[in-house]
Amino acid sequence: MNMWLRLQIDFFILFIFAQWIVKTNGQKYVKSTDEVNWYQALINCKIAGMELVSVHSEKEQNELEKFVEDSNIQKSFWLSGSREGNDQFYWVTTGEKMQYSKWLVDEPNNVTLPENFHEGEHCVSWGKPSALLNPDLPGWSDWTCYIKLHYVCQRPDNCD
């Protein structure tokens, strides 16, 4: 790809995110309108001057649950958690090992499927990607990083 075309694409992406941020009115969390894989969600939040959401406490979990409810989010979305080589989960936006978690029943399960190239599930989503969110049972699931989900970004000054 030539450099001029790449610059035009980068400018367009930044323009879209600038519009997105302006519409947030300083909110702590912002939900995406697009569905992307986990890696692209990290990039999109960073380009927007934000971080893919992480949850370090029950208080933060409750705040995010309220945001999900108030925003009428009905599908799963990416969190910034990732299973690393030592089989432990970390928040990649902060580098911290997960101390707090709210896994759904039978999660994390690291299932190996053709969809994840039999490599297991390494990225954390809110809810199960294959179903509508159950507002009465908010929780997390590990999933293949390559599926496309919505995502929630948070302002960096609120990342602990």
Image: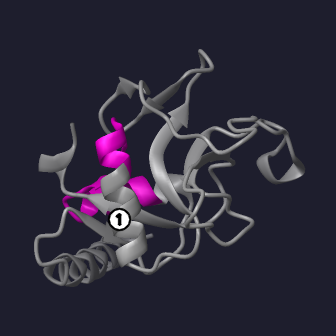
Q: Residue at coordinates 82% horizontally, 44% vertically from top-left?
A: 117
**Image spot of residue 135 (x, y percent):** 55, 67
Q: Quadrant of the C terminus?
A: top left
Tell me if 24 is positioned left or right of 80 in this view: left
**Which segment is the magenta one?**
41-61
Q: Residue at coordinates 22% horizontally, 82% vertically from top-left?
A: 15
157 in relation to 111, above or below: below
**Image spot of residue 136 (x, y percent):** 58, 63
Q: Residue at coordinates 30% horizontally, 46% vertically from top-left?
A: 60
**Image spot of residue 54 (x, y percent):** 36, 44
100 in relation to 19, above or below: above
Amino acid type, label 1 = Lys
Which residue is denoted by mark 1 in the rendering? 66
Q: Residue at coordinates 56% horizontally, 21% vertically from top-left?
A: 88
Res. 123 image quadrant = top right
Viewer-closest of 7 and 159:
159
User: Does the stretch in magenta take in 44?
Assistant: yes
119 in relation to 98, above or below: below
Q: Is residue 116 visible in the rendered structure shown here?
A: yes
**Image spot of residue 97 (x, y percent):** 41, 23
